[in-house]
Amino acid sequence: MKKNPAAPPVVELDPAVDLAALPYPGGTTGLPKAAMLTHRNILACQAEALAFWEDQFVEGGETVIAFLPLFHIYGQVVIMITGLLHGYTLVLFTTPEMDEILNAIERHQASAFYGVPSQIASLERAIVMLGLSAVKNIALAASLSRLFRAEAISEHFAARDLWRHSVAVAVAARLIAAQGGRAPADEVFVAGLVHDLGLIALRQLYPLKTRNLVEQAMNQPTHFAKLEQELVGISHALIGAELATRWRFPALLRAAMAHHHQPERAPAEHAAVTRVVHAADVESCRARYGFWLSAGGAVLSTADLDAVGLTAEQMETLVAEMAQLVEEAEQVFSE
């Protein structure tokens, strides 16, 4: 390079046999050892990575989180070289502390995450393993309870009450899906957990209007949506849908956040999950789990029950079984 600073020499390579790298992995699959990687090894691995992520990465528009050391060919090729080819920004951590990661996600607007499989030891980690690819989704699932720790703006609307409601809807949705068989239980759980994020945003954007909304809704609990439009001018469902779009949530979560009060408006491919979240929301509000005004006074129709595959009697039994599960879920998330 020193002899040819402007035009490095061209080297003839045989990609099948010529050495490209000699990494020393840390022994994750045995004792530490050197591994000879040919150019063909790296090209083949890169081709597979590009084929797998072709429709998931935005060219030049991603910011990716990864942790050091970068193990073996996966770290060096899939993370490093894929980043060069796609033109994304790579944020590296030497110590994966959750607070540092969450701060980096906000600071760098990260959109994807590389990591290695690990044991699922808690509900928080389980959500991370449910297949949500964007790191914002992972951060959301891992730190949602932190979003619900703000001071109360009304004696009838504390953030912790909205958190309890969200957990209850997630638990109820999972139970409904497992028993009714109309939607994947894991997917409805996450959808239930995030369905009311628009209310948190509403509270932050319009605190005085939201307080007024809640106070008036206490006297007219069956008119929350109407009051929301009259007093705030926008629904929390619409704000939630916009958040989901900006954070690149999967379309399924966007549909649940946008249409959980009007599931008939959800796209056909996401109608089953949205209807389950709607049913879980109504029943959780009816049972007064945390903040209940957003669906206060609502009752599931026969059509609603049919859509999730349950009878009225089965739903009553399911709601009666929720209390302990909601308590356990809250404890896990607060750890």
Image (tube, rainbow, N blue to C red):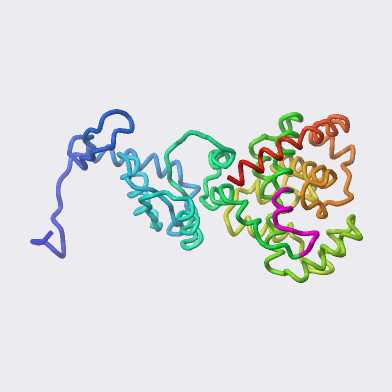
- Relative to residue 1, is residue 208 depicted above or below? below
Residue under the image location 90 percent in, 55 percent down: 222
Screen quadrant of the N terminus: bottom left
- Relative to residue 14, is residue 262 depicted above or below? below
Q: Compare residues 1 and 200 and report the one nearer the observer.
A: 200
Query: Is residue 289 found inside the magenta-colored segment of the image?
Result: no
Q: Compare residues 10 and 245 and report the one nearer the observer.
A: 245
Spot occupied by residue 332 in the image (x, y as percentages of width and height): 61, 41
- Left or right: where does residue 66 sit relative to residue 162? left
- Left or right: where does residue 94 sit relative to residue 266? left
**In which quarter of the view is residue 37 placed?**
top left
Query: Is residue 159 found inside the magenta-colored segment of the image?
Result: yes
Spot occupied by residue 91 in the image (x, y as percentages of width and height): 39, 56
Image: magenta residue range = 154-164
Residue under the image location 45 percent in, 56 percent down: 100
**In which quarter of the view is residue 274 placed?**
top right
- Relative to residue 154, is residue 176 depicted above or below? above
Residue under the image location 14 percent in, 49 percent down: 11
Screen quadrant of the C terminus: top right
Spot occupied by residue 55 in the image (x, y as percentages of width and height): 50, 47
